[in-house]
Image (spheres, rainbow, N blue to C red):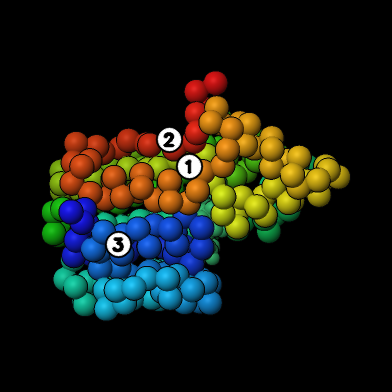
Amino acid sequence: MQRVKDKVVILTGAASGIGRATAILFAKEGAIQVLSDIDEEGLRGTYEMISQKDKINTLKVDVRRPEEVEKMIDFTVKKYGKIDVLIVNAGVVRVGPIEDFSDDDYDILIDVNLKGTFFTCKFAVPQFKKQKFGSIITLASVAAHIGQLNHANYCSTKAGILGFTRALALDLAPYNVRVNSVSPGATDTPMLRSDVAKQAENRGVDFDIVKKEFEEEGVLTRWASPDEIASGILFFASEESTYCTGSDLRIDGGWTTR
Ligand SMILES: NC(=O)c1ccc[n+]([C@@H]2O[C@H](COP(=O)([O-])OP(=O)(O)OC[C@H]3O[C@@H](n4cnc5c(N)ncnc54)[C@H](O)[C@@H]3O)[C@@H](O)[C@H]2O)c1
């Protein structure tokens, strides 16, 4: 059985990592998708990996730009008349000791992770309120639940996502729209690899040393594959989670159980 057959799904950050794995999984599960990303080449790569192309649309969207986000929502509603699932996945990481952290790095964290989430929901919410059904899924992180060395600003954006998700769940409950978040632990994507490389460089140690430290944070002592996060996103998108709203699913290999 396909769990999101012919559901209309919008996904941001679909060019890489967790977003790409989600697009591929949702295609197998029969979804009609509007896949977006700032990275056109990566988005093409995701498109090529999906066999049933007639159900796939790709759009270049920078989630920092409200007019581009609005176009994505309008395109979807005009073409399909509804949005069943909105997956707010685009995100960036910047790390470093707070005294050396640049304003530019701070701004990009806020603009993509928080404002990007706000814009994506802002333009979709009128349609959700009108149709009176749907599921919104945001991407928080293990970093929303615990501190990580040199991650203060990233942690603050992801903790912000948890607050945003809970509050929006209250606003949309009267409209039969559910809002939940997924909190991945260390997941093997270009984002995590760049994070580990930066930390290794800052500390003057090998990439593999920092990688091993991250692996040992989870009690399962390995990184997640992006597919393991995509299946949690699918749970919130599907009929299997109809009593969940305002909740957060930690898929972190036991990192936060210590
Ligand atoms: N990988 C991890 O270990 C991990 C852990 C916890 C949470 N997350 C979260 O999961 C989400 C996906 O991360 P990932 O690991 O797949 O990263 P990734 O870097 O592989 O993919 C992120 C995607 O977002 C896109 N993006 C960045 N800025 C954008 C913008 N302004 N507009 C549109 N798209 C933009 C990138 O081009 C990229 O395709 C993020 O929100 C991230 O914070 C990841």
Residue 167, quarter of the rendered image: top left
The crowding category of the residue bearing disc 2, from other C-alpha atoms within 10 Å (few below 14, some 14 to 19, many at least 20), is: many
Where does residue 49 sit, x and y in percent of width and height? 42, 71
The crowding category of the residue bearing disc 3, from other C-alpha atoms within 10 Å (few below 14, some 14 to 19, many at least 20), is: some
Where does residue 57 sit, x and y in percent of width and height? 33, 76
Q: Which residue is mark 3?
A: 28
Question: Which of 90/47 is in front?
Answer: 47
Q: SS class of the residue under badge 1?
A: strand
Question: Which of 62/148 is in front?
Answer: 148
* Residue 27 showing in the rendered view: yes
Query: Between marks 3 and 1, how big is the CA–CA gap?
Result: 22 Å
Q: SS class of the residue under badge 3?
A: helix
Q: Give the amino acid type for the residue marked by disc 2 in the picture.
A: Arg
Q: Is residue 115 left or right of residue 233?
A: right
Whether residue 233 is situated above or below residue 63 in the rendered picture: above
Q: Give the amino acid type for the residue marked by disc 1 in the picture.
A: Pro
Query: Between marks 2 and 3, how big is the CA–CA gap?
Result: 24 Å
Q: Quarter of the image containing the C terminus?
A: top right
Q: Which residue is mark 1?
A: 184
Q: Which residue is mark 2?
A: 250
Q: Residue at x 22, y 71 (%)?
A: 77
Residue 190, quarter of the rendered image: bottom right
- Mark 2 vs mark 3: which is more N-terminal? 3
Q: Residue at x 20, y 56 (%)?
A: 2
CB at disc 1 and ligand 1 closer than 8 Å: yes
